Image (spheres, rainbow, N blue to C red):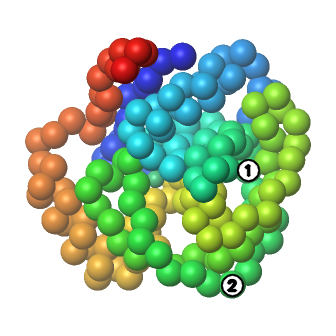
Amino acid sequence: MSRRDLYLLGEPVLRQRSMEVSAVDDDLRQLIADLFETMDAAKGVGLAANQVGVGVRIAVVNAEGNRFAMVNPLIRSAEGRDRAEEGCLSIPDLYAEVTRPHRIVLDAQDAEGTPFSLEAEGLVARVIQHEIDHLDGILFVDHLSPLKRQLLLGRWKKEHRGESTIKSLGPAEEATR
Ligand SMILES: [Zn+2]
């Protein structure tokens, strides 16, 4: 396993619709392992493949004890409404409240290509929706009002001017520590 570089706002792959996965092969299983390792290193609760520069419909989640990969994920149904703060590893240091459905049913495949369904609510449902948005080229700030989005992104771009839009997480820590 290895950590991959994080792709930040400004990288075109974050704005593209990622491609369906026709079969999960060894390369994609390696990608999934790397997504888990990169998410953990960045202390994230979810990570989509295009956030490490790979435009395929794969994401990983680690929230409230739910740790899983989802391949070709789809929201089958959604209900209720919740408002909560979100952030994104691709837009570091920017947080805002986003309204999303409270409860969802997810259809996806696992790392072996086996289909599964999952009912989720609260934070887990929110992370799943945030990651599927990524696969469609959507960022959480797109859910804000145009005015708020402009304000926050304007400030963010100013603060991060001149910085690389590809971020290395550095070498893994000593396994013994
Ligand atoms: Zn994100």
CA gap between label 1 and label 2 equals 20 Å
In the displayed structure, would residue 46 be above or below residue 167?
below
Report whether 52 appears left or right of 92: right
Disc nearer the start of the sequence (1/2): 1
Q: How many marks?
A: 2
Dot 2 alpha-carbon crowd within 10 angstroms: few under 14, some 14 to 19, many 20 or more: few
Q: Please, what secondary structure does the residue beneath circle 2 have?
A: loop
Report whether 94 appears left or right of 114: left
Q: Residue at x 29, y 33 (%)?
A: 167
Q: Quadrant of residue 69?
A: top right
Residue 129 visible here: no
Q: Residue at x 27, y 39 (%)?
A: 165
Q: Quadrant of residue 86?
A: bottom left
Give the residue type that dot 1 points to: Pro
Residue 92 visible here: yes
Give the residue type that dot 2 points to: Gly
Image location (x, y in percent) of residue 135: 59, 49
Front residue of 3 and 8: 3
**CB of mark 1 near ligand 1 (< 8 Å):** no
Report the residue marked by disc 1: 73
Report the residue marked by disc 2: 80
Dot 1 alpha-carbon crowd within 10 angstroms: few under 14, some 14 to 19, many 20 or more: many
Image location (x, y in percent) of residue 57: 66, 41
In the displayed structure, would residue 159 be above or below residue 12?
below
Q: Which residue reaches farthest right?
A: 115
Q: Residue at x 64, y 50 (%)?
A: 65
Front residue of 76 and 38: 38
